[in-house]
Structure formats: C-alpha cells, structure tokens
Amino acid sequence: MAAKLGGALRTLRYLTTRPVSCRLIGTSPSVRCVHEDRPQFPGSKSKFTYKLSFLDPDEEAGIPVYRVMNSEGEMTEKSEDPKIDKTTVLKMYRDMTLLNSMDKILYESQRQGRISFYMTNFGEEATHIGSASALHPEDMVFGQYREAGVLMWRGFTLDQFINQCYGNTEDVGKGRQMPVHYGSQDLHFVTISSPLATQMPQASGAAYAFKRAQNGKCVICYFGEGAASEGDAHAAFNFAATLDCPVIFFCRNNGYAISTPTSDQYRGDGIASRGSGYGMLTIRVDGNDVFAVHNVTKEAREICVSHNRPVLIEAMTYRIGHHSTSDDSSMYRKKGEVVKFDTNNPIGRLRSYMVKQGWWNDDQENEWKEESKKMVMESFAKAEKRKKPNPTELFKDVYEEIPPHLQKQMDSLKEHLSKNEDKYPTQNYEACKEYMYQDLSGSMVGVTRSHS
Amino acid sequence: MRHREHSIRCFQFISHLQKQTWGIMQRKFSTTASRAATQMTVRDALNSAMDEELARDEKVFLMGEEVALYDGAYKVSRGLHAKYGDKRVIDTPITEMGFAGLAVGAAMAGLKPICEFMTFNFSMQAIDQVINSAAKTFYMSAGTVPVPIVFRGPNGAAAGVAAQHSQCFASWYSHCPGLKVVSPYNSEDCRGLLKSAIRDPNPVVCLENEIMYGSPFEISDEALSPDFLIPIGKSKIEREGKHVTLVSHSRYVGHCLEAANELAGIGIEAEIINLRTLRPMDDAPIIQSVIKTNHLVTVEGGWPQCGIGAEVCARIIESPAFNYLDAPVMRVTGADVPTPYAKTLEDNTFPQVFNIVNTVKQSLKVP
C-alpha cells in the first residue's frame, strides 16, 4: 500500500515540472522524466543533449548577404524593389557623386599641402546614402569618420565640409578639430571623435535617453569591422540589448582596417555572426547596393522604434581608397584587387539602374560631372581665402563658463596682439568679437574686458 | 529591575562617553557656526545628496555596478533603487568602458547621469571615455555638445586592499582641462559638492574616500537643506592659524586637524585649508595665507611626483607669496610605492599625523 502510494506520488512528480532529480524505478527505459529535458540554470534554459559535439563555425555556411539590385543595376527580386521615386533616386545619385568629387579634390589639396589631412569615402557611398535616406532627419547619428555621405544627405553644404577641413572662421567646429571630424547639432550628427568605437556605448546611452523620453527617435551608430574589435563594441552591444535601447548598429565591413585585412581582424563569420550572441536581430547586406541598404535600414528603424530593441546591420563593401592621406595602400594590397572593386562600384551600379529606368543618360552624366566639379571648386576657392578664427577662440568652450585663469590669459593675449600687430599676420585672423563670461556664482555677465 | 535599570544607564553612559571621545577625535574647528548638533555620516551625506537631486530633476539618474539591487558596493546608494526604480537607478554589466561610454552618450543626448565607479582604480579601464569623450567634447564640438555628467566613487587609500585598489587619481583627473574635479572631506563637503556637481553642466569628477564613508560629522541645518550647494572652485579655511599653512584635500584634512591640535600644544597655530575643489583650484586663499604665515606644508595621500602638492607649490612660487616664504614649501605625500597589503606596511605608506607634525616642525625649524 505504501509502495503503491509512493509509486503514485512519483508518477505525479513526473508530470509536474518541478526540478527534482528523479530515479526511474521499475519502469521501461523509454520513459523519460519530462522535467529533466529542460535545464533550469539561470544562465540558459535551452535543452539537454547527450551527444558531445562542438559548434563548428567553419561548418556554417555564413550569414547570407541581402541584395536587391545586381551589378548591372537590375532588380533581381521585384518584390523587394523599394520603388523609390525618381526625385529621390536622382538626389541619391547626385549626393554620391558630389561626395566623390569633393573627396577627390580635397584629397589632392592635402597632397598639395593646403590641408593637413583627409579621408575619402571611395566605394562606400551607398552605405551612407542608402542608410541616411531611410532614417528620419532627427534620428541621432554617431559616426566613426567615413560617413560624410550621411551628412551630405541631410544637407551639410560643400562650404561647411570644406570650411571644416580648412578650420577657417566659418567652420561650424571653430577650428578645433582636424579635417573630416565633422559635427552638426542642427543635423543631429554628433561630432566625430578619433578613438575608435568610443562612440558605440555612447550611442547605446543616447538611445537609452531617447527611450526614456519616448520621443519616437532612434540612434544609428556607424563603425568599421576593425573598430568592432575594440572592447567598447562589446560593451555597446551588450548594453543596447540588456537595456532595450532603440539603436541601429551599422557596421561598414570594407575589408581593411588601415592595412589589417579581415582575415587578421577576426576568425568568425564577420561582425554579423556576433549579433545573435548578444540577443540582437541581425542582418547582412550588400553595402554597394543602395536600395538594399535602404530597405534594411528602414526595416531596422521600424524594429528599433516599435520594439525598443537594437538591430545589427553588417554592410559588406570595399574601401577603394587609401585609409587616409597618411596611408599608401599599395604597400599591402594588389592594384588588381582595387581595380576589380572600382569597376563594379556602387555609383556605377546605381547609374546603370537609372539609365535603365530612362532617368539618366550620358549627356546628363557629363553635364553633372562638370557642374559638380565646378561646385566643389567654387566652395574650395572660397574656403581657402577665408580668414582663420580669432586666436581668442582657443580659450573658449573648455567649460560651459570660461574660468578666470583662461579669461586672464585671453585678455593678456589680446593685449599682446594689439600692441604687436605688426609682428603677427593678424590680417589672416578674424577680428575679436565681444564675448560673454560667467562668474563662479553662476550668473551670466556680459563683459568687454579692458586690460588691467 | 533596578539592576536592569542600572545596566541600561551604564550602557547609555558608556555609549555617551564613546560618542564624546569620538566627537573629540573628529571635531573640526570649523569657521561656520553649526546651529544643530545633528550627526551625519559621509555615506548618508552622499546618499541624501543623490536622493534630493534625483527627486529634483528627473533627468538625473545613477548607474554603476551594484548600485541598484545591492544598494551600492559600499551602500552609498542605499534605498535609492527602492525609491526611484529601474529607470533612475541602474545596475550595469561589468564593463567600465561600456557604462562610462553609455553614460557619456546619455549626457550628450540630454540626460544627467551620475556614473559610479566602484573605485576610481577601475576608472582606468574607462579613462578614454572620461577624458577623450566627456572632458574634451564641449571644446571639440565648438560648444554644441555639452556633457553634464558626474563620475563619482571612492578614491585613494582604502583598508587592506593593496596596490590595485588604493591608488589616488587626484593628479590624473585634475590635470585635464574640460573636467572639474572635487575632493570632499566631511559630510557637509560631500553634500554640498556632490549636489553642485550634479547641477553643473560640465563633466565633474567627484573623488570620495571609502575610509571616510562611515565617519560621522556634525552637520548644520543649513547643510541639510535641499538647496544647500558648495560652489565648485572654492576652498575652505577649516582652522585659522598664524604660524604655518597646511593645504590638504579629502581624508587628510582630518589628519591635519589632529596634527594642528598636537601642534597647538607646543604653541604652533596651524592654518588649515581644505581645498574641496582640485580643478579649478582656488589658490587665492592659499596665497593670502602664506603671506600671513610664511610657511607652507601640503598634505595628500597620492604619490609625490606630479602630485597636488607639486601644483600648489608651483602656484605659490609663481605668486606674490613667494617673497613671503621663510622656508621651502614642503610636501607630505603617500610613499612612492604601489600600496602594499600588510597592515604595518600599508599604514606607513600613507601620511600619518606624526608625519605632518614632524614636517611642520622641520619647516619652522623647531626641534
């Protein structure tokens, strides 16, 4: 009787999901405890397996690359055609080619010693334009340094780009940063910061702030496949996932991190393979197909904003130019490789599409080439002639309010310059303007300081 | 019954005696009048400052390792998660570079984070975010991207945690333009400076001290009011004197006060300046003081090379006070070694009261 009761009780236990270890006594070997098939560890609740086998990354086929348009500019999958209107497509093309022209001219200007440094975007224009065109203008952008096309799409003018490179008095950045370290508060593009991947956890943080504010905006964070090796990248992914942040992580996998090829940068299946590890929705896309990039970014944005979860996009592309003006990539890659990708570049592909649509022809191409070059050269000439910022700009914006010791130093410099104008090329610098300074008690005091 | 009553009275008397003794040991010769004899520990001072600022401005939030559910590794954020919830008090994964970066990003997007480092030793893993992102961004962005963030946590000497948990970062952070750095000593300092730091639109580093967390101090009604602020960039004269100027920050202000008591016994009246803020450093009162006393001794827990004392010394030499010095400026600092573990070794690695007394005597040429 007691044994029967015991047996009945044991059966009852099998039917529940309580994590009690059970012993099979006197039952057929095919019976398994239901609850023992599910591990109960706090870290993972998948399934048990009784077969010893390692997950082999080499056996996996690799995450497929989503594309919409083939190399000839034809829509391969009609259902995926975003059917973007002619005006927008023409803007896309013009922005990509204008960026290209500007890059060529500014690269040369560095070679001629006119600016100190430059980085081109050759080959990656579609990643910029495709993604930027799918975002809302107020979505916050954290870039790495090779996303000038995003700014161009949003309306940063040639003047603004070139003024920044020259660090002249019209530079939005007040001559504080080296070339290509653009920023624009109006266009919601955070000023570029050199240390790699530091923008990534910041992007997660900004997205967290947006989520708290419930403002329907998302953040997009661009980074290269090399920067993804930084510790910051891991932290950013993990945080975005655990804190449910509406951020799109957009990786430009362009094959090289200066001279380091991807084969030395990682052993796994690119950056996309890491996404699932963090619990993020992930997709890999043909970065040279502007429509595919557009589709993917649009969908990613929807996911972010509706579900407050991060998305990882890995855009496969190729860096046609050198890393920067301080690099000579012929030292580490064969010319043939570059030519191959240059022949099949994103601009050409979009042009083929436009021609097939009847929206573009050779005459328009030549006309636009001339016009865009002329536009760039005009801005360039103007920027070069502009004066440099007044030296007193050196002392401002260290803090929200200018501290007394810097105030004194600024006054002392002004006094020195005014007394020794003939010894300095002051005509190249903009004249002093009035400034405001805040005293330590916190009140704003408008002052034209006279020398003590 | 009577016996029990008697025991209770004895107990009360003894604990009263203990409080008195403790009070004597901790008493600060403050120039501000304290109207009430309320006691508050440094921990509670920091806790109440954060509590009030979280209540006052919903953009303020606290993040760090163990700050929420565990009430803080040193219990400084006790009760805050229970009161304000997940949105305002956040436990982070173990990645200083990650959560410092995240906090900086949140600040750039309009929030006001308080980023806690379990100790500032771990901030080295995040130092790029603190310096290259938080400190420099306002300047680099030409004034368009403010970073209103506070980095806080214990700094410098702890007890028995050796080299990688006892380093002082006062010099490291106060070196950098774009950052403000405060180093509070007592409960009033902690309340006033942390509240000012949270309200400041610039990035501020608040260097606390773990050994001080449990120390109670008398605190005035004024210091307990929710809008009590101590301006960043102003030091405090803790004790007036005429024979020597002692300049210190954080825990060692207390050591200076004790040393001053001892010195008073032999007729030496020390003037003690509590820096309170390391950057921007308030050197004017130091200059005035040295003009009066003609002798300067600095006291800090950090290493001697490129330390706070070195900066104070340089400023005095560059000032009119140079002509009033009757002896070279002397520095009492931590020993130039990574902090050892064994107690006797550790005790002798950081300034003790007798070190300060001896150095003052050297400065004054008193045997």
Image: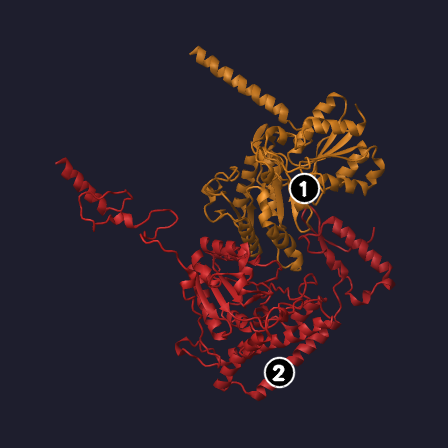
Point out the frontmost of discs 2 and 1: 2
On the image, numbered disc 2 is attached to which residue?
Answer: A369
Q: CA distance from mark 2 to mark 1?
A: 59 Å
Colouring mode (rainbow / by chain / secondary structure / one colour): by chain
The reply to whether the C-beta atoms of the residues labelled 2 and 1 are less than 8 Å apart is no
Instruction: Chain letter for orange, please.
Output: B
The reply, left or right, for residue A208 in relation to residue A413 is left
Name above or below for residue A345 compared with residue A267: below
Badge 1 density bin: few <14, some 14–19, many ≥20, Cα 10 Å:
many
Please identify the quarter of the rendering in which residue B342 is found: top right
Identify which amino acid the numbered label 1 is placed on.
Thr
Report whether mark 2 lies on the same chain as mark 1.
no
Q: Which residue is mark 1?
A: B277
Q: Secondary structure at mark 1?
A: strand
Report the chain shown in red: A
x then y, percent, for residue A449: 79, 54
Question: Of helix, strand and loop, which one carries label 2?
Answer: helix
Mark 1 falls within which chain?
Answer: B
Chain where mark 2 sits: A
Is residue A449 visible from the viewing direction of this image?
Answer: no
Residue at the extreme bottom: A363
In this view, B94 is above or below A421: above
Residue A437 placement, left or right of A154: right
Q: Indicate left or right for B266 with B13 as reference.
A: right
x then y, percent, for residue B229: 62, 41
